[in-house]
Amino acid sequence: MHQTVAFLSEWGNDIPDFSKRISELPTTHFIDTALIASKKVIAAAKRVIEAVRNRHFSGGVLDSESTAK
């Protein structure tokens, strides 16, 4: 049986106020991200993610705000 695992993340304004007119709404965004992988490759994927975390995020949380510098 083929087993898969999904890693999900979201970021942004998920509650815009649609009662306002379009011209009154601030520019907003909402981003969903999903990584879907076979259970067979999870260990390898974790090693790659850890390498990226160590190289670009000083071993901390992978966060887009850290890259905006």
Image (cartoon, grey):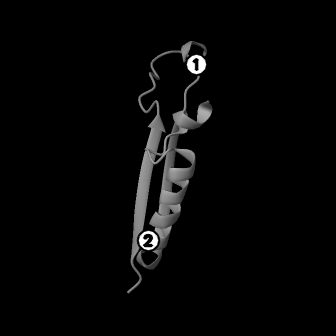
Q: Mark 2: which amino acid?
A: Ile
The alpha-carbon separation of the residues under discs 1 and 2 comes to 44 Å
Secondary structure beneath label 2: helix
Q: Residue at x 61, y 14 (%)?
A: 23
Indicate which label's residue lies in the foreground, 1 or 2.
Answer: 2
* Nearer to the camera, 5 or 55: 55
Q: Is residue 56 above or below residue 39?
A: above
Secondary structure beneath label 1: helix
Residue denoted by label 2: 42
Residue 42, percent across and down? Answer: 43, 71
Q: Residue at x 44, y 21 (%)?
A: 17
Residue denoted by label 1: 22
- Asked whether the beta carbons under mark 1 and mark 2 sit within 8 Å of each other, the answer is no
Which mark sits nearer the N-terminus, 1 or 2? 1
Q: Is residue 40 above or below residue 17?
A: below
Q: Residue at x 50, y 59 (%)?
A: 49
> Quadrant location of the C terminus?
top right
Q: Mark 1: which amino acid?
A: Ile
